[in-house]
Amino acid sequence: MLASLPPPDTNLALQMEGVRKSFDRNLVLSDIDLGVAPHEVVCLIGASGSGKSTLLRCINLLEDIDQGRISFFGEEISAEAVDVNQLRRQIGIVFQSFNLFPHMTVLQNLTLAPIRVLGKSRPQAEAEADALLGRFGLLEKRKEYPDRLSGGQQQRAAIARALAMQPRVMLLDEVTSALDPELVAEVLNVIRSLAKAGMTMVIATHEMGFARDIANRVCFLDGGVILEQGTPEQIFRQPQQERTKRFLQSLTEAGRL
Amino acid sequence: MISDPGGFDDTPLLVAGGPPSNSLGGGRRRSKLHGRRAIAVSAASTVVLLGVLAALFFYAPGSAQVRETFFNIPDARTAFLGNPRGGIFSELDALLINIELFLSAEVLILILAMVIAMVRQLSGPVTFPLRMMAIAYTDFFRGVPLLLVVYAIGFGVPALNLAGVSTQPVWVYGLAALVLSYSAYVSEVYRAGIDSVHPSQVAAARSLGLSHGQTMRSVVIPQAVRRVIPPLLNDFISLQKDTALVAVLGIIEVNRAAGIVSSTDFNYTGYTVGAFLFLLLTVPMARFTDWLIARDRRRRQAGVAH
Ligand SMILES: Nc1ncnc2c1ncn2[C@@H]1O[C@H](COP(=O)(O)OP(=O)(O)O)[C@@H](O)[C@H]1O
Ligand SMILES: [Mg+2]
């Protein structure tokens, strides 16, 4: 079946074709087709459990897929022989729960992978880390341990840690869901600045206002398929599918849209 | 450019638990009063308990005899200092052997146990035989009494007549037995520590491109080791006293020296002295371990994880 697929599209940063993934008997992604162009920002929306996190984890090869193909700048990455460590350097992922390393300072969190994986010298890695921390308003926190930081600061540090590897694509998985409401804006602003700088991103989010103004394209995930996709205008103003309408309706009622 | 509004930077994530300062002051005063009373009560109850125990000891029908055979002052002196002319070894000197044994055993155990724990962490079919061996190793050495391991290695290995291996000084076999047996326990302690590091930490490290080995070395092991220090020290307390078991190989450590004193004087005081010397080693370690655990708990409650 795979043999019949045409070669991956070299114009796309990311391409998922017929991707299927299940945990035991539970089919989580049933037939995902998704292309992301360079510099594009794609937002994934959908109810909890609709498979957003799993989709992102599959792209980063944190999960093996059962069927289909994932390509990165025209190269198939879902094949057995792919060097996952080599690939993961180029794709940054940020998690809902920050996952900073608690036994390292913020600076050490940022320099670990550039030194260990890219073989950078410590002074160079630290200079680059400081530049990122300065950009994210965290320079005074460079020697602090993560648990001395607010949630918003921790999440900005986690984003900076991913960026320290100079990835070509960033995957963000509900990065504001664990934050107190007053800390959400500072993190969203960081992401907006990334979008402005042209970073290719796939963002799973519950922040519909944010998705509306940052996304080039919005995909509504439901039951493991991309039920509907389009510009924010199309999805939020004129959703075609009944389930999309109902999802957006439920958000409006909850006061989140 | 993103600038951080100063307010966020000054907000600590977690504030150490406790009521506001004025009510804290009141609480402290109350607890001081309470504290003085508590000390008086506990002192009194300790005196009463010790008094009852002493009374039982001194008024027991065989008290005089036991005091003579277990707490004989001149014999205790001989046991401590030895008597070269009578062929009696000083237990104080012998204690150095125990200390040397457990110090070198500790270092070797920490290394061997880590290797075993790492092997058990491996995944994939290629490493299956290694994993099986590591499991068999821990099952075996946790299941067989240490004394039997000491016998088996101390008498079995020399009898094998293997060039280089069978002609070592006796203490090497004793040390080997301690290391083999304790590494099985300590590798399980390590493993529990490794398992306690949340999988999301591994995902974060791997997503940055770190290999499995780099992830273990830089992210998992450092967090695991911090958490297992108290249970590790606990195992080392029992290691300290289990160094006594190598006596059966004829090594003159405290237990053996005590045996010699006792059989020469026909008196058990030498063993009492031996017990006292072991307590001298283990009690400070036990207090230190408790102090570490309490400090960890305080820090966790204050929201500081390291
Ligand atoms: N590691 C896992 N093992 C088993 N089931 C999982 C695992 N991860 C996710 N799932 C299941 O996959 C489904 C989709 O989860 P997820 O991708 O986290 O959705 P979302 O991020 O949209 O909330 C859920 O039913 C969840 O229970
Ligand atoms: Mg999710």
Image (tube, coloured by chain):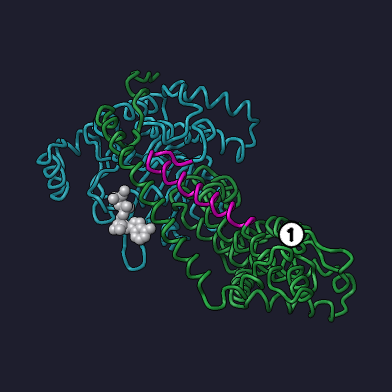
Residue range highlighted in magenta: B280-306
Asked whether the viewer can see residue B24, the reply is yes
| Chain seen in cyan | A
Q: In this view, does A168 lie above or below B272?
A: above
Q: Give the residue pinned by disc 1.
A: B95
- Please state if B176 lies on the left or on the right of A250 as rendered: right
Rendered location of residue A215, percent (x, y): 29, 33
**Ligand 1 sits in quadrant:** bottom left
Asked whether the viewer can see residue A21, the reply is no
B16 vs A102, nearest the viewer: B16
Residue at point 26%, 49% (across, down): A221
Rendered location of residue B219, percent (x, y): 54, 46
Residue B80 within the segment the image draws in magenta:
no
- Please state if A248 lies on the left or on the right of B249 as rendered: left
Is the CB atom of the residue marked by disc 1 within 8 angstroms of ligand 1's nearest atom?
no
In the structure shown, which secondary structural element does the residue marked by tag 1 occupy? helix
Residue at the left extreme of this rendering: A253
Q: Mark 1 lies on which chain?
A: B
- Please state if B101 lies on the left or on the right of A181 as rendered: right
